[in-house]
Amino acid sequence: MKKKYTIQKSPFVVPTTDGKLIEEHFGLASDKNQAISIAHMIAPPHWKEPFQTPAFDEYTYIIRGKKQFIIEDERVVLESGQSIKIEKNTRVQYSNPFEEPCEYLAICTPAFSMDLVNREEE
């Protein structure tokens, strides 16, 4: 009988050049799941990404530290224990301008893909 669950013991570690740790537990890079991606991340102090307008909903849950979001023209800062849903086709920039690392979970539906993230040139 086929098991009706999957335990992820070896998440895919996404190679980065900005010091950010990305461990994808489920999603395109880890198990080819196109419907959802779930990743554990640690953003180092003073890290930021370019603005993007993803074609997926993104949920973020802060485990420790703080993370800054610029959503359209509004600045939002989340702290440990807080979460946010950012709807697809919303212009957003993610960053950690603070002195401590930020550990968080990111869930994207459909799954995160470079083809769907629509990052702007810096």
Image (cartoon, helix red, strand yellow):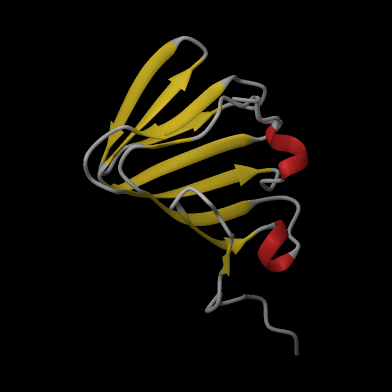
* Position of the N terminus by quadrant: bottom right
Q: Residue at x 72, y 50 (%)?
A: 35
Q: Is residue 103 above or below residue 24?
A: above
Q: Is residue 17 left or right of residue 57?
A: left
Residue at image point 62% right, 53% down? 37
Q: Tell me the quarter of the picture where residue 55 sits.
A: top right
Query: In the displayed structure, does residue 52 sit left or right of residue 73?
Result: right
Outermost top residue: 73
The x and y percentages for residue 104 are: 38, 49
The quadrant holding residue 68 is top left
The residue positioned 56% from the left and 37% from the top of the image is 58
Q: Position of residue 102 (x, y in %)?
A: 32, 46
Viewer-closest of 23 and 82: 23
Position of residue 28 measured from the top left corner of the image (x, y, whole percent): 72, 57
Which residue is at the front of the view, 75 or 46?
46
Q: Is residue 40 left or right of residue 77?
A: right
Q: Which part of the image, by quadrant, shows the C terminus?
A: top right
State the residue in front, 90 or 19.
19
Residue at 46 percent across and 32 percent down: it is: 94
Task: Tell whether 71 sits left or right of 119.
Answer: left
How many numbered marks have been drawn onto this rendered protein structure?
Answer: 0
List the single residue furthest toward the left. 99
Toward the bottom, the furthest residue is 1
